[in-house]
Amino acid sequence: MTDTLQPRQTFGPLLSAEAMLADSAGDAAFATTLAKGLIVLEAFDAGAPLLGNMEISVRTGIPRPTVARLTHTLAELGYLRYEPTLSKFGVGSRALRMVHPLLADMPFRQRARPLMQDLAVSVRGTVSIGLLDGPSVIYVETARSGDVGPHSPDIGMPIPVVRTAMGRAAASLLPADEAAQLGRQIEAADAAAWASDGELYRAGLAQCAQRGFCTCFGEYMPSIHAVAAPLFRASRLKRTFAINCGIPEFRLQPGQLEAEIGPRIRALAAAIRAMVHEADATAAPRMRHSRSAP
């Protein structure tokens, strides 16, 4: 597989445990040991499915002896599994139990999937729904044609807000104060990405306000061009969703993404909102976001 098929680095280095816990230092009710255990779980990703204690320590900034106690406990509980031949740990099957209640609370995904599948097959690409989670968006549903190449989004996969159409579309639904806060979070998580793609991020917010969708021409994965539309913001839990369509670059004609695929993903978003009786998401994005985001 060539380098052109690989996504650019999704995030910067993991923040150290010290940095992540600093804001809660004065909170007597904050369970520091629990927080460190969750940080250990988040050290694993698709690029590093197996990690040793020292690798986890380097990734998180948590001292190795503490990591050893945490991984032992998590393995005993089934949230990690131990591979004795490699002296490394991987995420255990019990971790899936935490995912199911969240996904079950989004029943619109299953109702939207046939519409997503129709578009994915029609354009020979992928169509996915993402949930905004700080400086990342996490896929919660996806549909694909049978020949999309090496890029296969999957449920639970995180992608960066700043470098993706999906992320920009989701961010466009935020009120101005939350949009500004998100900009600061993105910069803190990956200053290099913010410096290189911050202007494109702000342009994406403006595109959503003006056209109801935004584009991404390989900023995240060079061989894939994408378009995304704001979906809706669930007011009860403040969950913010967007929907995207990714297509291999070689399958697109000049101008096709903006003239054809963009309006289709915007229409699909509207159809899904109507299906779940949500308010029009394009009413929420405002041009002020492009000015106020840091």
Image (spheres, grey):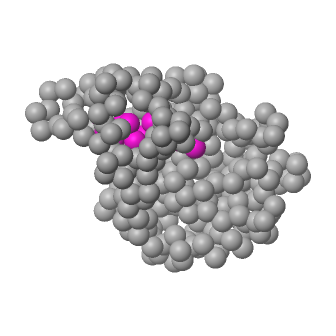
Look at the image and tell me whether residue 62 can be seen.
yes
Q: Residue at x 62, y 43 (%)?
A: 164
Give the answer, above or below, for where 104 lies relative to 181: below
Split into 4 quadrants, where in the image is the N terminus? top right
Residue 118 placement (x, y as % from top left): 72, 73
> Splitting the image into 4 quarters, where does residue 28 fall?
top left
Which stretch appears magenta?
A: 36-46
Magenta-colored stretch includes residue 43? yes
Where does residue 230 sit, x and y in percent of width and height?
55, 56
| Residue 270 sits in quarter | bottom right
Residue 265 visible? The answer is: no
Q: Position of residue 112 (x, y in %)?
A: 57, 73
Where residue 194 sits: x, y (%)?
A: 55, 27
Q: Would residue 52 be found to the left or right of residue 235 on screen?
A: right
**Residue 7 included in the magenta stretch of the image:** no
Count up the numbered dots. 0
Closer to us: 121 or 209 = 121
Residue at x 53% of width, y 74% of height:
110
Q: Is residue 169 above or below residue 274?
A: above
**Residue in the image at 72% along x and 69% along y:** 119
* Residue found at x 70% / y 59%: 126
Q: Is residue 159 above or below residue 261?
A: above
